Amino acid sequence: MGMDVAFWILAVICVGAALAVVFLRDIFRVALFMILCFFAVAGIYITLSADFLAAAQVLIYVGAIGVLLMFAIMLTKESKRGSLTGKLRPLSMLVAILFMVTMILVVISTDWNVAAEVSKEPTTARIAHSIFGRDGFVLAFEIASALLVAAAIGAIVLVRERDK
Amino acid sequence: MSVGLEHFLILSAVLFAIGLYGALAKKNAVVILMCIEIMLNAVNIAMVAFAHYVDVISGQVFTIFIMVVAAAEVAVGLALIISIFRRKKTLDAEKFDILKW
């Protein structure tokens, strides 16, 4: 019962913050509402008893990505002009609403194969077994770390000032 | 009616649609990047909801990989945006035409 109330509150915060990201004009407020949306998503992970992912969400999205986007807004002096919409606005509104209606209809009309009993134990150990255990995702894990190194080096190369 | 899998999937669809609208309609490249992050978060919610209700842990592992890719994407994307801003002095995505000929 308590989880249901928590879900509704978090869902309303999440959708409201996302709408604010899309419709507000001030870019700095847009970034703050995006961070609020990420926080609400971390709460939704907790209602789904995904404790490790909730912590990772706060660390990566709220901490790293939020701060990085703030820096980008401050480094590029474009914030005075505000967050404008282009010529495609009516068309993209139509596409988004069509997509949303289709997805909701599909979700409602599908008979989902839900497990009879969901486990409530901590997930960190299960995730670790799934990644590093036998027949796990070790290769994907190593590729992900290579991707992170490549992205870090690429970002440094892209923003470096060329001196003569 | 208690909260079930469908509620999380519908929340995910709504968030994805909001992000899709922003990514298509906005002019500022940083705001487009934020909307793409919201779309990735929506997909993550669907993944974790499946992992919880179908009781397979792979959904959470996939979410971790999506987070890694999102972090890499934001780092490279912001580097590109700053580098383009230095040359063209604008962040208007409709004026980024250096790949056109």
Image (cartoon, rainbow, N blue to C red):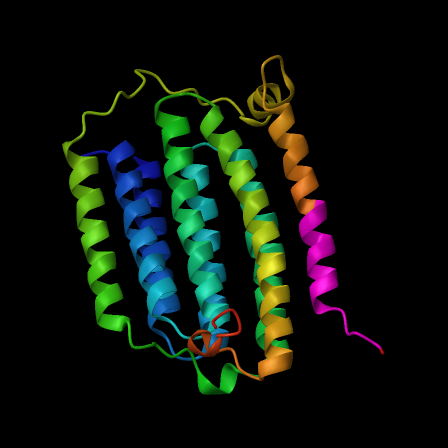
| Residue drawn at 37 percent across, 30 percent down | B50
Residue A62: image location, x then y, percent: 56, 55
Decide whether residue B97 is among the magenta residues.
no
| Residue drawn at 42 percent across, 76 percent down | B94
User: In the displayed structure, would residue A139 be above or below residue A13?
Assistant: above
- Residue B1 is left or right of residue A114, and the answer is left
- Residue A115 is left or right of residue A129, and the answer is left
Which residue occupies the extreme bottom position in the image? A80
Quarter of the image that includes the N terminus of chain B = top left
Residue A127: image location, x then y, percent: 57, 25
Q: Quadrant of residue A105?
A: top left
Residue A80: image location, x then y, percent: 50, 87
Closest to the observer, A103 or A87: A87
Do we see residue B67 in this rendering?
A: yes
Decide whether residue A156 is among the magenta residues.
yes
Magenta-tinted stretch: A149-163
Closest to the observer, B84 or A137: B84
Which residue occupies the extreme top position in the image? A134
Q: Quadrant of residue A17?
A: bottom left
Question: Is the magenta region chiefly helix, strand or loop?
Answer: helix
User: In the displayed structure, would residue A58 be above or below residue B30?
Assistant: above
Residue A6: image location, x then y, percent: 35, 44
Which residue occupies the extreme front position in the image? B101
| Residue drawn at 42 percent across, 34 percent down | B48
| Residue drawn at 63 percent across, 56 percent down | A64
User: In the displayed structure, would residue B90 be above or below residue A121?
Assistant: below
User: In the displayed structure, would residue A1 be above or below residue A17?
Assistant: above
